[in-house]
Image (cartoon, helix red, strand yellow):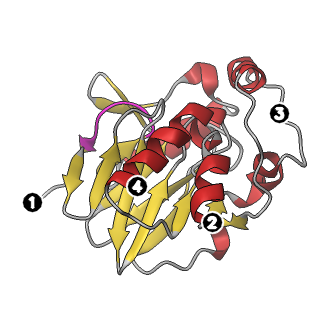
Amino acid sequence: MKISDSIEKIDGAMANSYLIMIDGMNIIVDAGTPGSGKKITGYLEDHKIKLDAILITHYHVDHVGGLSRIYEKYHPEIFVPANELSIISGSEPVPPKPFLPKFASTIMRARKVKDLKSSSDMNISGIELVKTPGHTRDSTSYYLKEQKVVFSGDAAVNLKGVPGYNKGFAANPENAEKSLKAIRTMDALILPGHGDKMDLRTGI
């Protein structure tokens, strides 16, 4: 689904996955479940797109499960939240709380990718990091500055048309609330990990 001239939402992924085309680069935000990886690579193949990078918002399996399939085909750079790199690579166990993400990770085991980079080392022109912890310990959003677009992962999802978060999945509800408040004050189009876009931009 077309969001703008340079942003597409890839249909069929369990959690929203977005394609950004900026400065000659093709970048995916979040990789869905293991099954979603096939849908994402199929989309890229159908549109004859060579993938350059993947940006991950947090370690939950519905956002990282498709990484291995995508990586094996395209070998893009993969940037993940710095304090979750060890979880996503498999060198640290998935935290036991909250229960539901741990349960999902147990059911939908995904092959791990070791070739990961910290999102703090990302240097892609026009994209900035926004630290939004709480949903997970280092949940990270990505801000497309020129277009005023925020890829919020699950730090802000669409709850009945407004930015919210799922308390049952939050590792630290207090931090999650703070991050949500920060996102709500942004003059931006919010592209969440779940649900439809939410336009908070003014003066457009």
Is residue 117 inside the magenta stretch? Answer: no
For the point 80% across and 51% down, the residue is 89
Q: Please, what is the three-letter code of the amino acid marked with disc 3?
A: Pro
Q: Earlier in the sequence, mark 3 or mark 2?
A: 2
Q: Please, what is the three-letter code of the amino acid marked with disc 4?
A: Leu
- Per the image, label 3 sits on a secondary structure element best described as loop
Residue 75 image label: 2
Q: In the rendered image, which quarter is residue 199 located in?
A: top left
Residue 193 appears in the rendering: yes
Mark pair 2, 1: CA separation: 38 Å
Circle nearer the viewer, 1 or 3 = 3
In contact (CB < 8 Å): disc 2 and disc 1:
no
What span is in magenta?
Answer: 193-198
Mark pair 4, 3: CA separation: 32 Å
Disc 1: which residue: 204
Left or right, 148 with reference to 78: left
Residue in front for this viewpoint, 15 or 130? 15
Residue in front for this viewpoint, 11 or 159? 11
For the point 68% across and 50% down, the residue is 138
Q: Image quadrant for the C terminus? A: bottom left
- Per the image, label 4 sits on a secondary structure element best described as helix
Residue in front for this viewpoint, 184 or 30? 30
In contact (CB < 8 Å): disc 2 and disc 4:
no
- Per the image, label 2 sits on a secondary structure element best described as loop
Residue 44 image label: 4
